[in-house]
Image (cartoon, rainbow, N blue to C red):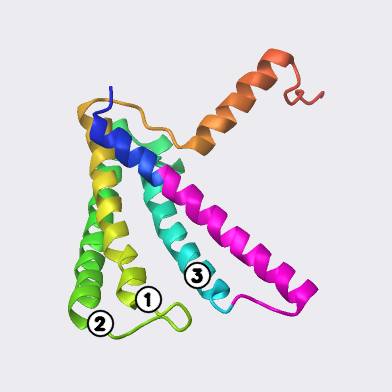
Amino acid sequence: MKPLLFKIIDNLEGVLCQLLLVSFVLLLFAQIVLRNLFSYSLPWGDELATYAFVWFAYLGAVYATKMSAHNRVTFQFKFFPRWVESFCMVLTDLIWIGFNAVFIYLSYDFVFNKMNLFWKSQTLGVPMKYFYLILPIAFVAMTLRILQNNYLKFVKKVDLVDPESQEVEKFKHHDDATGNGPKPREQ
């Protein structure tokens, strides 16, 4: 059973991603309609849609980390003992955490130390610090999700399977059950 904090964070991530996706799609749709039908556009629409997309992309990367859905090349592990796969997965996750640590430091330094407080967005007039804040937030959250996944995988012995693999397996089982799967070649 998940702790309450993880449930809240999971729900918050999902809601934020959905809200940002809907926001930038609706803004861009409104801009297209307004430009083509009324020869007018919202002065702040493109800028806000861009920032919503950037936040969506970074939060989507965090969500994909939680779901273990980032691309990994794992075919070569079929030829080695199981411990080699585990060792390589931990090693790549440690490298990923190191990469994130560098970006956490650099983005935090940029947002809180080097960014001028008077830098504002062109049309919204909002300090740019708020838009760039996604950088340290996303890399910290990704690091926490990597640690969470490794805890689940190696301590709790939970088999984490990315959603795409789960869907492929569902189709295979469905096709096998209905007889609609690929037919063997006749020789």
Give how far across and how far down residue 107 sits, in percent.
Answer: 25, 71
C-beta proximity under 8 Å, tags 2 and 1: no
In terms of depth relative to the viewer, which is nearer, 172 or 55? 55
Taking 33 as reference, is 6 left or right?
left
Report helix, strand or loop for mark 2.
loop
Is tag 3's residue or tag 1's residue first in the polypeptide sequence? 3
* Residue 62 lies in the magenta-colored region: no
Q: Is residue 96 visible?
A: yes
Is tag 2's residue or tag 1's residue first in the polypeptide sequence? 2
Is tag 2's residue or tag 3's residue first in the polypeptide sequence? 3
User: Mark 3 highlights which residue?
Assistant: 48
| Magenta residues, dominant SS class | helix
Segment tinted magenta in the rendering: 14-42
Taking 139 as reference, is 170 left or right?
right
Q: Residues within 10 Å of mark 2 (few under 14, many from 20)?
A: few
In terms of depth relative to the viewer, which is nearer, 21 or 158? 21
Q: Quadrant of residue 26?
A: bottom right
Q: Residue at x 78, y 26 (%)?
A: 185
Which corner quadrant holds the N terminus?
A: top left
Look at label 3 and name its amino acid: Leu
C-beta proximity under 8 Å, tags 3 and 1: no
User: Mark 2 highlights which residue?
Assistant: 117
Q: Residue at x 79, y 72 (%)?
A: 37
Report helix, strand or loop for mark 3.
helix
Q: Which mark is residue 126?
A: 1
Q: Which mark is residue 58?
A: none
Taking 82 as reference, is 94 left or right?
left
